[in-house]
Image (cartoon, rainbow, N blue to C red):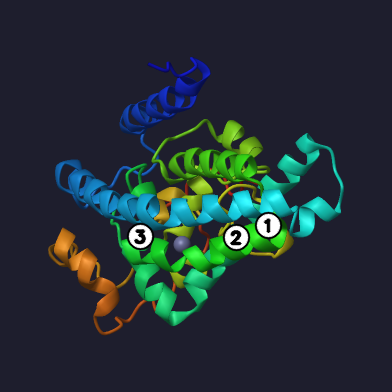
Amino acid sequence: MTRSKPSAWIGPIAFIATVVALFWLERRYPLRKTKPESDWKRVPRNLAMAAATGTVVSLCERPLTELLARRVDRRRAGLLPRLKLKPLPEKILGVVLLDYTLYWWHILLHRLPFLWRIHVVHHADLVLDSSTAVRFHWLEFLLSIPWRLGQIAILGIRPQTLQLWQRLTLLEVLFHHSNLRLPIELERTLSRFVMTPRLHGIHHSMAAEEADTNFSSGLTIWDILHRTLKTDVAQNHIEIGVPSPHDPRELKLLDLLKLPFQHPRAGKSISSARGIDHVDRHGKNVDGPHYVG
Ligand SMILES: [Zn+2]
């Protein structure tokens, strides 16, 4: 009988510990306090969506991407091998470039109507927390496979780099979707480098000019470079979700699974009518105006 190395357990244990810690912390120190739906209904529904998506990932995405990464590695094909870097710099640059090309996939999910019809399932959640991080329609992951294969083939991504990027991205996505109230100074510092809960809260706003910002999934540099970073919105002014569907009675599990196949809804038509975003109704500065800069 072969025994797996102790190091093989570090990843899964760290992942489970992170999920449990985030789930507890975001309820102990919540960032946004309004909850149009109870956790007892939402969280199991989001996990059911995640189970369907996880099935697509393990049956289709994982085998295809791993096969291609192994082939790319054997042939030393793609951009990165041409740079003739040492293994560690090549791995780091690979992770950074995968993150950058994921930024562009996220832009396409919002800009192309047929992709938005699927991505809207993720954005329609009325509460934003770590369970939203795994609530995607299975079709979104199926349609992302050609993009993922293109990333691997063009960039020349090796299997170890792909695995590292997948793990880091999953942890970062869980973190920035969470409803965890970090000390503002800590979040300001962190948000200069990576996507944070307050920044991603703005991306999940019902207001179109806020939802069309903060697309980065890992490093915030991509939003800074492409002028899609938005920092000056207070969390208590954000209404999470999309204009339609926005009624909890239309957001049950079956509704979410059917949503991409239905006639397109109004989508992102609402506009924020706020004056000064960071000042509350009583004129008091509630959250600090900016996180970056
Ligand atoms: Zn999005």
Asked if residue 186 is positioned above or below residue 40 in the image, the reply reads above
Q: Element under label 3?
A: helix
Of residues 287 and 197, the one drawn nearer to the viewer in this rendering:
197
Residue 233 visible in the displayed image: yes
Label drawn at residue 222? 1
Tell me residue 244's x, y (percent).
Answer: 28, 73
Residue 241 visible in the displayed image: no
Q: Element under label 2?
A: helix
Marks 1 and 3, the one that precedes in the sequence: 3
Q: Which residue is mark 2?
A: 103
Q: Residue at x 80, y 51 (%)?
A: 81
Q: Count neighbours of disc 3 (C-alpha within 10 A) and say few if under 14, some if 14 to 19, many if 20 or more.
A: many
Tell me residue 148's x, y (percent).
Answer: 55, 61
Q: Give left or right: position of 63 versus 148.
A: left
Label drawn at residue 15? none
Of residues 231 and 155, the one drawn nearer to the viewer in this rendering:
155
Tell me how far mark 1 sits from mark 3, CA to CA: 21 Å
Label drawn at residue 122? 3
Q: Count neighbours of disc 2 (C-alpha within 10 A) and say few if under 14, some if 14 to 19, many if 20 or more.
A: many
- The verdict on label 2 being within 8 Å of ligand 1 is no
Tell me how far mark 3 sits from mark 2, CA to CA: 16 Å
